[in-house]
């Protein structure tokens, strides 16, 4: 047995991931970056996976605050999403999507409410709509 300290990580091995603070900012996560059109990205993925023979160059987005080389003056440039920039500022988190489904609430054979999922009245959310039973057919 050796008396050396065990490095942190899975089963005493090396760390699985680099510390988050040491990772360079990627353009796709930066607030200054404008991504390429979705259609162009979709076409490129089809070409890359061999689903299309039409050659598509790797799509690039655009940033007007890229620091290139040792320059301290921001420049406008086309960059790929995985490009590391020294002028990285994290984009604000995207809001979690709220319920956007359309809901129909039935009591017996009768529709009592229809509408977007995030606008369901509280009386139906509680599980006791307090409605009379539907008439028997």
Image (cartoon, rainbow, N blue to C red):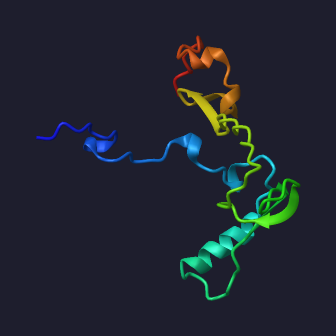
Nearer to us in this view, 73 or 20: 73
**Residue farthest top in this picture:** 130
* Residue that appears at 69% across and 38% down: 93
Rendered residue at 73%/69% (across/down): 39
Q: Residue furthest front?
A: 3
Answer above or below: position of 31 versus 74: above
Instruction: Tell me the quarter of the picture where residue 40 sits.
Output: bottom right
Q: Position of residue 120 (x, y in %)?
A: 67, 25
Q: Is residue 66 above or below residue 31?
A: below
Residue at left offset 78%, top offset 59%: 70
Determine which quarter of the picture holds residue 33: bottom right
Please provide percent x and percent y for residue 26: 67, 54
Q: Nearer the viewer, residue 91 or 41?
A: 91
Q: Is residue 132 above or below residue 38?
A: above
Q: Give residue 69's quadrant in the image.
A: bottom right
Residue at 66 percent across and 69 percent down: it is 42
Left or right relative to 80: residue 47: left
Count numbered badges in the picture. 0
Residue 123 image point, x, y percent: 63, 14
The image position of residue 50, as x and y in percent, is 54, 82
Find the residue positioned furthest to the left.
Answer: 1
């Amino acid at each position: 047995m050796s008396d050396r300290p065990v490095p942190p990580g899975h089963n005493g091995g090396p760390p699985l991931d680099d510390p988050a603070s040491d990772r360079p900012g990627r353009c796709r996560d930066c607030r200054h970056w404008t991504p390429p059109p979705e259609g162009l990205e979709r076409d490129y993925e089809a070409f890359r996976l061999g689903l299309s023979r039409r050659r598509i160059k790797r799509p690039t987005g655009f940033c007007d605050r890229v620091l290139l080389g040792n320059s301290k003056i921001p420049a406008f440039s086309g960059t790929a999403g995985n490009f590391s920039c020294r002028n990285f500022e994290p984009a604000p988190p995207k809001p979690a999507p709220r319920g956007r489904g359309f809901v129909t609430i039935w009591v017996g054979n009768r529709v009592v409410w229809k509408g977007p999922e995030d606008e369901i009245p509280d009386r139906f959310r509680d599980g006791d709509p307090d409605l009379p039973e539907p008439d028997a057919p």
